[in-house]
Image (cartoon, rainbow, N blue to C red):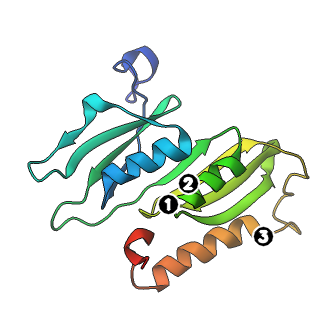
């Protein structure tokens, strides 16, 4: 029998996970600070790889048991923000910390399927974060038929707004 195509557990290098999200942004070093301040992330200093210009070609921020890999956009490259799902203990606290650092709330903390709360934010680099937290109370969102469409509508409005603006730049380049 041949080994599985995807490596897991002890087949991975120490500290690594099977899948690792990557974002290419303008201002990777500042995004690292945002993640440290909002999510209590920790940069993996040994992974930081600057170009002669000082731009980061590679960096990693540890969050819980996972890492987000980052790079600064290079000349001719597009910004490629990430869509990220993060399990947190207090979604409202994370939202508040993010908003203090110029993130935009997409979805307020709302009861969701499976007895958890869900919130969403868009950081100043254009990444969209799904925050899942233990339920604070309230009724879980019912199935689609006859239930609230807020969860879908809040994300839909944001993504359509980005697409229809003709400018898919991160928020930080659009702020005065």
> Position of 76 compared to 105: left or right?
left
**Closer-to-camera residue (126/17):** 126
Disc number at residue 75? none
Residue receiving disc 2: 129
In terms of sequence position, does the residue under pointer 2 or pointer 1 come before the other? 1
Q: Residue at x 58, y 73 (%)?
A: 158
> Residue 47: image x %, image y %?
26, 33
Residue receiving disc 3: 149
- 134, above or below 30, in the image: above
**Please, what secondary structure does the residue beneath circle 2 have?**
strand
- In three-dimensional space, the C-alpha distance between marks 3 and 1, rounded to whole angstroms, equals 23 Å
- In three-dimensional space, the C-alpha distance between marks 2 and 1, rounded to whole angstroms, equals 8 Å
* Among the 4 quarters of the image, the one containing residue 175: bottom left
> Position of 9 compared to 2: left or right?
right
Q: Which one is closest to the eye, mark 3 or mark 2?
A: 2
- 46, above or below 154, in the image: above
**Please, what secondary structure does the residue beneath circle 1 have?**
loop
Q: Quadrant of the C terminus?
A: bottom left
Q: Quadrant of the N terminus?
A: top left
* Among the 4 quarters of the image, the one containing residue 82: bottom left
Is there a contact, CB below 8 Å, between mark 2 and mark 1? yes
**Please, what secondary structure does the residue beneath circle 3 have?**
loop
Q: Residue at x 57, y 59 (%)?
A: 100
Is there a contact, CB below 8 Å, between mark 3 and mark 1? no
Q: Which one is closest to the eye, mark 2 or mark 1?
A: 1
Classify mark 1: residues with Cα within 10 Å, few (<14), some (14-19) or many (20+). many
Q: Is residue 1 visible?
A: no
Residue receiving disc 1: 123
> Residue 39: image x %, image y %?
55, 42
Classify mark 2: residues with Cα within 10 Å, few (<14), some (14-19) or many (20+). some
């Amino acid at each position: 029998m041949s080994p599985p195509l995807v490596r897991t557990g002890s087949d991975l290098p120490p500290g690594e996970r099977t899948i690792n999200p990557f974002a290419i942004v303008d201002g990777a070093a500042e995004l690292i600070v945002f993640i440290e301040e909002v999510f209590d992330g920790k940069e993996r200093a040994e992974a930081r790889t600057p170009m002669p210009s000082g731009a980061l070609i590679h960096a990693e921020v540890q969050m819980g048991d996972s890492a987000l890999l980052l790079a600064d956009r290079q000349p001719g490259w597009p910004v490629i923000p990430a869509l990220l799902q993060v399990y947190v203990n207090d979604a409202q606290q994370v939202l508040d910390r993010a908003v203090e650092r110029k993130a935009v709330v997409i979805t307020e903390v709302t009861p969701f399927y499976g007895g958890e709360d869900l919130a969403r934010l868009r950081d100043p680099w254009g990444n969209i974060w799904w925050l899942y937290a233990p339920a604070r109370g309230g009724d879980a969102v019912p199935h689609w038929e006859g239930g609230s469409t807020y969860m879908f509508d809040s994300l839909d409005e944001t993504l359509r707004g980005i697409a229809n603006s003709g400018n898919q730049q991160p928020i930080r380049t659009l702020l005065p």
